[in-house]
Amino acid sequence: MDEKFAELSFWDTYENEISAKLREIDVLARSVKTGISIDSLSEVLDIGSDEIEKIMMNRGIKKLSRLNIYKVLLDSSATVCDFFRREYALGSPLVYTREDIAYIYDIDRDILNRVCDELKIVETTAFFFKDIFTRLPAKNLQGK
């Protein structure tokens, strides 16, 4: 494990990389009433504007808006979009099983099961992710 991540937990990864990026996307989508610029989305997702343009062309999107930005996220190669895509595939559950959490966040099932057993968790809501994620090792999401 990278020494920089040795003392961090997955909660740090979740809060500083995953959740923070999703909040940025949400703020972008909610704050722009006339349309979202490709450059703004490109900057938030840390991908090239050419990728966004290609997705828009493939999906028949002429102008980015708060209503269609999520279609772009589903096709984007941005790391945060991997999590978004997997959660979307599960229907964005309100209650998560261990399997859901492992799948969405690409967490080793054996490690997650051990932590959930310790906490006596079978199902949970996002409100309790901190309890679980602070007991899991951090992940370096840079470069996937």
Image: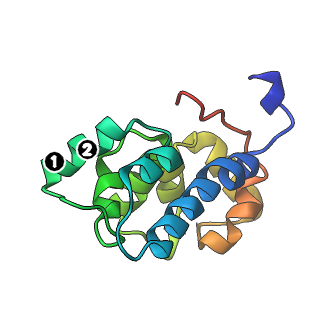
Q: Residue at x 83, y 23 (%)?
A: 3
Relative to the observer, which residue lies in front, 36 or 66?
Answer: 36
How many other residues sit within 10 Å of disc 1, few (<14), some (14-19) or many (≥20)?
few
Q: Which residue is mark 1?
A: 57
Q: Which percent across, then down, holds residue 18?
A: 59, 51
> Which amino acid lies under the numbered mark 1 shown in the image of this protein?
Met
Q: Residue at x 43, y 52 (%)?
A: 41
Q: Residue furthest top?
A: 2
Residue 32 occupies which quadrant of the picture?
bottom left
Q: Give the spatial CA distance, label 1 vs label 2.
A: 6 Å
Residue 103 visible to the viewer: no
Q: Residue at x 69, y 46 (%)?
A: 13
Q: Is residue 56 above or below residue 22?
A: above
Relative to the observer, which residue lies in front, 54 or 101?
Answer: 54
Q: Are marks 1 and 2 in contact (CB under 8 Å)?
A: yes
Q: Which residue is mark 2?
A: 53
How many other residues sit within 10 Å of disc 2, few (<14), some (14-19) or many (≥20)?
some
Q: Which percent across, then down, holds residue 33?
A: 40, 77
Q: Residue furthest front?
A: 34
Relative to the observer, which residue lies in front, 86 or 50?
Answer: 50
Q: Is residue 117 above or below residue 111?
A: below
